[in-house]
Amino acid sequence: MSIKPAKVGIIGAGNVGAAIANALVLLGKPTSVVLFDRNLSKAEGQAWDISDAIPLLVEMDIMPSDCYDDLADVDIIVVTVGVPHRPGQTRLDSLNANATILCSLVQELDRVAPDAIVIIVSNPVDVLTRIAMETSTRSQHLIFGSGTVLDTARLQYQLGKVLNVDKDNVHIPVIGEHGESQFPVWSTAVIGMIPLTQFPLPKGTSLEQIQAELGQVTRDRGNDILKRKGHTSYGVATVVAQLIDAILRDEHRMFTVSTRANPSYGLDSEVVLGLPCIISRHGIERCLVLPRNEVEQIQLKASATKLQEVYQTVFWQNKPCYSDRLTVA
């Protein structure tokens, strides 16, 4: 299926925003990108640098902007703005400042592009996605976060290396918070058509050992990168490029994005966290219910409880400027 002509807006010309724009150019996804930043000079520098690759690749437009009205005809908006996640911090530590930033941003996006699909990438992505859903006037299926898509990809790749199997044959989701309380749903793990519990393991290893080591590596990977280079960008940029591609191609592809949980999960109806959904040109087409065992259900509830507590304590104590728009059930 060919990509329809499309326009993507990226909010924030920092490390992540620029990496996403660059990934879209390298992969030849949309036909036009608006790189928005309130610092126009920064947006221009990033856009012009990225544009220098276009003569060697697929024809595309990269337009720097500091004007929200330039986003009026975009199909997809990616939000990357916020206070950087620094070494020693959790993704939740930046919530106060980023929630306030998101406040005015959502209002502007509702004004200029009310029908665009909005992908939240800023951290803490789960809580900020919830805030965006609660403050936006657009349909809820048009808003989701990057969730645990990157965490899932990390785990599937590493597990494939351990088993000496192509990553595309490895199927296991990481769900919950994009952060410390995330976890792999090992009970659903399948290698090709064979359950992981029945798949031959390398000599000298056990399933328990593999699960413990890879779960830890997946959970710590972002912080390990952060400690060494000060930020992460390339992995999440590729994730966002894939999400955009799935939308533009109307692929109905499954991703573990940040969204509200299906009632069958038995969680608070308002909490947002990484769960499997079908993504199409309509945004979230369907929220799926993932089979899980008793231990995994306990882990999921613990992750949801953590996110709910952070939302309630940090969010409400600081009363961001959009709180008067919020309706509490």
Image (cartoon, helix red, strand yellow):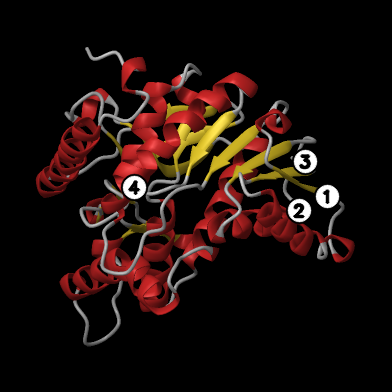
Would residue 180 appear left or right of 193 to someone viewing this image? left
Amino acid on which the number 2 mark rests in the picture: Gly
Question: Closer to the camera: disc 1 or disc 4?
Answer: 4
Would residue 221 appear left or right of 61 to someone viewing this image? left
* Residue located beneath label 4 in the image: 124
Residue 2's disc number? 3
User: Residue 86, can we see it?
Assistant: yes
Question: Closer to the camera: disc 3 or disc 1?
Answer: 1
Q: Residue, x 18% and y 27% (percent of image)?
A: 268
* Residue located beneath label 1 in the image: 60
Q: Does label 1 or label 2 sit earlier along the sequence? A: 2
**Picture coordinates of residue 160, whole percent (x, y):** 41, 71
Q: Residue, x 41% and y 58% (percent of image)?
A: 84
Mark 4 and mark 2 residues within 8 Å of each other at the beta carbon: no
Q: Does label 1 or label 4 sit earlier along the sequence? A: 1
Q: Does label 4 or label 3 sit earlier along the sequence? A: 3
> The C terminus is located in which quarter?
top left
Marks 4/2: CA distance?
Answer: 29 Å
Amino acid on which the number 3 mark rests in the picture: Ser
Marks 3/2: CA distance?
Answer: 12 Å
Local SS, label 4? loop
Is 60 drawn above or below residue 265 in the view shown? below
